[in-house]
Amino acid sequence: MKIEKIFPSFGVESSSRPQEKTKTGGFKEILDQALTSPPETNPSTPVSFPPVISLEPEELEGIRQAEEILSIMDNIARLASQGPLSGSSSAQSLEERGLELSRLAETLKPGPAKSLMEEVATLATVEALKIRRGDYS
């Protein structure tokens, strides 16, 4: 049953009906046009990537040391989660490695590697102080 029969005021006026769409061509015409037109980009053109940043040997060594410090800090966090942590040797090791990394960072020119090394060295020093102060015991 149509709603116009129940409520005549809801009738659809003929002027509000959508007009017929204009035809632009069938699928075959569009496909033929796409096949005959030259491609905008050549699919066989290799994608280029920005050049890889080359690091100096000192920067690589500093990054290796930073990773080592972060590993030590992960181990300390695991030990601290198992119970009270009273490790002056852990604090001393962290502090020494942080100082060594800081000294190495001082010799480098400004850049991402130097920034990373300085941040990790600072973090190591702060965590060593927290261990000594007893924050994790």
Image (cartoon, rainbow, N blue to C red):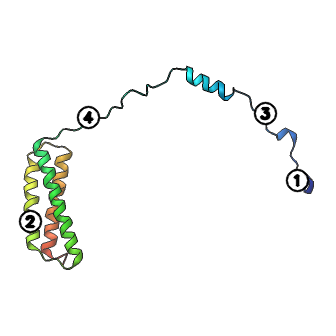
Circle 3 — which element?
loop
Q: Which residue is mark 4?
A: 51
Q: Which residue is mark 3?
A: 20
Identify the residue at image location x=19%, y=75%: 136
Between the C-alphas of marks 2 and 4, the distance is 37 Å
Between the C-alphas of marks 4 and 1, the distance is 68 Å
Label located before the other in sequence (1 or 2): 1
Residue 52, horizontal then vertical, whole percent: 24, 37
Count all numbered tags in the image, as a single digit: 4
Q: Is residue 46 above or below residue 115?
A: above
> Closest to the observer: 57 or 114?
57
Circle 1 — which element?
loop
Q: Which residue is mark 1?
A: 2
Residue 51, horizontal then vertical, whole percent: 26, 34
Which quarter of the rendered picture does the N terminus lie within?
Answer: bottom right
Give neighbour class at mark 3: few <14, some 14-19, many 20+ (Cα, 10 Å). few
Callout 4, which amino acid? Pro
Residue 53, horizontal then vertical, whole percent: 22, 38
Circle 2 — which element?
helix
Identify the residue at image location x=43%, y=25%: 42
Residue 90, horizontal then vertical, whole percent: 11, 69
> Closest to the observer: 66 or 38?
38
- Identify the image quadrant of residue 6: bottom right
Callout 1, which amino acid? Lys
Q: Residue 93: give its label.
A: 2
Callout 3, which amino acid? Glu
Label located before the other in sequence (3 or 1): 1
Between the C-alphas of marks 3 and 2, the distance is 81 Å
Which quarter of the rendered picture does the C terminus lie within?
Answer: bottom left
- Identify the image quadrant of residue 32: top right
Between the C-alphas of marks 1 and 2, the distance is 84 Å
Do the CB atoms of the residues marked 3 and 1 lie less than 8 Å apart?
A: no
